Image: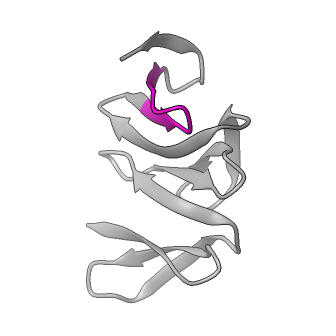
Amino acid sequence: MNIVQIKSGGKVELRKDSGSLICTILDSGAVFADLNSDQTLVLITRSNGKVELRKSNGSLVRTIVDRGAVQARFSGKDILVTTDKGKTELRKENGSFIRTI
């Protein structure tokens, strides 16, 4: 079981549950991060409101939202994005909009 951790300055690290570092996923700018259930993908919410989907090695898969996000987390295979307007958007893993909750 792995853990995603945000350090000061928004650095995102992937760690083993023992605490040892596996890799650094992002150097700065993150405010929230979430691992998917099989721990192959990391969803990162940045301080500028952008949401990025990355592989567990740190490589960028795609941008889910360009701006306005406060938090994003996995909900099964889909993604829940909380916006700065107080709404929650349900999106597919490819970033396409499903509906507002």
Residue 37 to residue 92: above or below: below
Name the residue at 56% across, 53% down.
44
The image position of residue 67, as x and y in percent, is 71, 38
Closer-to-camera residue (11/23) = 11
66 lies left or right of 96: right
Residue 78 to residue 54: above or below: above
89 lies left or right of 48: left
Q: Is residue 57 visible?
A: no
Name the residue at 27% across, 87% down.
18
Q: Is residue 83 magenta?
A: yes
Q: Residue furthest top?
A: 99
The image position of residue 89, as x and y in percent, is 46, 23
Q: Is residue 33 magenta?
A: no
Q: Quadrant of the C terminus?
A: top left
Closer-to-camera residue (2/91) = 91
Count of numbered tags: 0
Q: Quadrant of the N terminus?
A: bottom left
Looking at the rendering, the stretch of residues picked out in magenta corresponds to: 80-91
Name the residue at 49% across, 59% down.
32
Within the image, what quadrant is residue 94 found in?
Answer: top right
Within the image, what quadrant is residue 77 found in?
Answer: top left
Name the residue at 54% across, 32% down.
85
* Majority secondary structure of magenta residues: strand
Residue 5 to residue 20: above or below: above
Residue 76 to residue 28: above or below: above
Q: Is residue 22 visible?
A: yes
Within the image, what quadrant is residue 31 found in?
Answer: bottom right
Q: What's the coloring here? A: one colour
The image position of residue 97, as x and y in percent, is 55, 14
Closer-to-camera residue (26/10) = 10
